[in-house]
Image: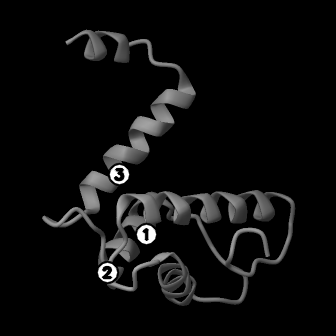
Amino acid sequence: EGFLKAKLSIPPGEKVMLDIVAMFHQYRGDDGTIDVPGLVNLMKENFPNFSVAEKSDTDYLSTAFEKKDENKDKKINYSEFLSLLGDVAIDYHKILHGVVLCFGGSQ
């Protein structure tokens, strides 16, 4: 209850973190993971303006998914999801500065 009251005046950074958790929970399956179709839906619905130079969104996401699916179970768990979002955030930063993208965060 105390947390919900505090949520009314939540700082922006904390709100972002809670929104990320909520987004993951919205798209995860009963097993607590997101599959490729779920990831595609998540990206299209939450990042509609995200575009990757000379690559289709699906190719970008498939590559991202394969790189982040560390245990190769064709599903993204929460930790893998956070890693993927980190790379997407890096690519958003590169877009902001006009850099041509190549998935992989630090590439």
Q: Which type of secondary structure does the marked residue at label 1 adopt?
A: helix
Q: Which type of secondary structure does the marked residue at label 2 adopt?
A: helix
* Residue 20: x %, y % from top left: 42, 46
Image mark for residue 44: 1
Q: Categorize mark 3 by other alpha carbons within 10 Å: few (<14), some (14-19), many (20+).
A: few
Marks 1 and 2, how far apart at CA: 11 Å
Left or right of residue 42, residue 27 in this image: left
Q: Is residue 53 above or below residue 1?
A: below
Residue type (three-letter) at the residue carrying disc 1? Lys
Image mark for residue 92: none
Residue type (three-letter) at the residue carrying disc 2? Pro
Image mark for residue 23: 3
Give the residue number, with chain letter if any, for mark 2.
37
Q: What residue appears at the point 70 percent right and 66 percent down from the top-left corner?
A: 91
Q: What residue appears at the point 19 percent right and 67 percent down from the top-left corner?
A: 29
Q: What residue appears at the point 35 percent right and 65 percent down from the top-left corner?
A: 77
